[in-house]
Amino acid sequence: MPDALARGMRMLLGQRLIDEHAYDKSLCTQAFERLLAEPRASPIAIDTQAANAQHYELPDASVSGLLRNRFR
């Protein structure tokens, strides 16, 4: 890896640590709690009807083609 690329990556990672408050324990804890609060407040599954329609509906021809002589 070129040295300039490694230095750029280190600079970006350092800036990310500053942005994420890695050096301030209380701000880091608050940011982490905010990160956890969003999924806790949202529903487990969103638009389950559309997901079920997309993944579980098979045409009869494909089922009979898969089962062939085992089809009752």
Image (spheres, rainbow, N blue to C red):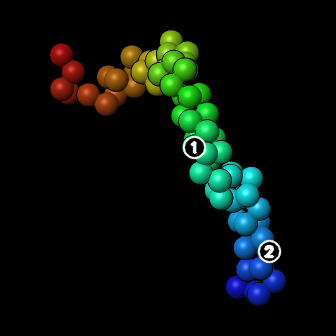
Distance, label 1 to label 2, CA atoms, is 28 Å
Question: Viewer-nearest of labels 1 and 2?
Answer: 1
Left/right placement of residue 68 relative to residue 58 reads left
Left or right of 64 on screen, residue 55: right
Closest to the observer, 69 or 13 = 13
**Position of residue 67 measured from the top left corner of the image (x, y, whole percent):** 26, 28
Whether residue 1 is visible here, answered yes or no, is: yes
Neighbour tally class for label 1: few under 14, some 14-19, many 20 plus, Cα within 10 Å:
few
Q: Which disc number belongs to residue 8? A: 2
Q: Specify the amino acid type for callout 1.
A: Thr
Q: Residues within 10 Å of mark 2 (few under 14, many from 20)?
A: few
Q: Is residue 30 above or below residue 16?
A: above
Residue 27 is left or right of residue 67, and the answer is right
Q: Quadrant of residue 14?
A: bottom right
On residue 38, the disc is none
Give the tally of numbered discs.
2
| Mark seen at residue 29 | 1
What kind of residue is marked 2? Gly
Residue 37 vertical position relative to residue 29 in the rendered view, above or below: above
Q: Residue at x 59, y 28 (%)?
A: 38
